[in-house]
Amino acid sequence: MSYTKNVVPALCSVFTLSLFSSLSYGQLITPGETSESAPATESKRLFGIVPNYRTSPSLDTYEPISTREKFKVASEDAFDRGTIGLAAIFGAESQLTASNKAFGQGGAGFGRYFGSAYGDLVVGDFMTEGVFPTLLHQDPRYFRQGTGSGMSRLRYAAGQIFWTHRDSGGTQLNYSELLGNSVAVAISNAYYVDNRTASDNVSKLGMQLGVDMAANILKEFWPDLERKFKHKHER
């Protein structure tokens, strides 16, 4: 997960700039609108690369999903070509900065960096979207608020990292996100031989939660961004 030191903050910056660009143009959904005004078929890859399989338009008619469906969501995220592309980007960045010298350089070194980065993403997806949601009876999906002010939606999206929905209804501390990513970080110690200290692990966990928070924010405002891009093309 060492790839997060440089690439992930850059991706978060892209998400943030896109969001506030949308805010500045006044194209966010207002209290009188709903996300239904967005394109009928929502893209499964945000910006063409970030997987978007576990986003639900709203909580108006909540229905829990089965264990099989939870693992299907995890599989769709983990094995999507966008995830593979992200792993390649993260692996290349880590190799350029030699963040794990034991991996070496050249083609073989890149294979190790890429494999480790992809392993991080796959393990993280299955732990936070399949394993722990099943064990703890929590829902791994992101439920879009879709209405209200930009700031209220921003707070809602960020808060979903720490607060989630139970299969039985109601909300609960997002143990699946917190424990799932903690386990993923612990597993990564098996192959990141140069980054095994306690501070390294805390940094990895913090960055992973930050990545997931940025993804939630992007999912919340994606219909607004799509509408903005569509308006630009129509001019």
Image (tube, rainbow, N blue to C red):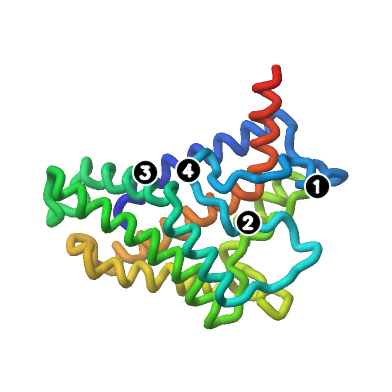
Residue with the most extreme top position: 235
Report the mark closest to the observer, 3 or 2. Answer: 2
Q: Is residue 225 above or below residue 178?
A: above
- Cα separation between marks 3 and 2: 24 Å
Instruction: Name the amino acid, label 1.
Output: Thr
Q: Going by the image, does 32 lie left or right of 157?
A: right
**Badge 4: few (under 14), some or many (20 or more) residues near its Cα, within 10 Å?**
some
Across and down, in percent, residue 209 comes to 47, 60
Across and down, in percent, residue 22 comes to 66, 34
Q: Which of marks 2 and 1 is nearer the N terminus?
A: 1
What residue is pinned by disc 2?
A: 55
Q: In this view, does 108 lie above or below 235?
A: below
Report the mark closest to the observer, 1 or 4. Answer: 4
What residue is pinned by disc 4?
A: 49
Q: Which of 186 and 116 is in front in this view?
A: 116
Q: Is residue 131 above or below residue 46?
A: below
Q: Which of marks 1 and 4 is nearer the N terminus?
A: 1
- Give the numbered dot on residue 34: 1
Q: Going by the image, does 164 lie left or right of 127?
A: right
SS type, badge 4? loop
- Count every numbered label the image shows and give the total: 4
Q: Earlier in the sequence, mark 3 or mark 2?
A: 3
Q: Are marks 1 and 4 in contact (CB under 8 Å)?
A: no
Instruction: Name the amino acid, label 4.
Output: Ile
Instruction: Name the amino acid, label 3.
Output: Val
Q: Nearer the viewer, residue 109 or 84?
A: 84
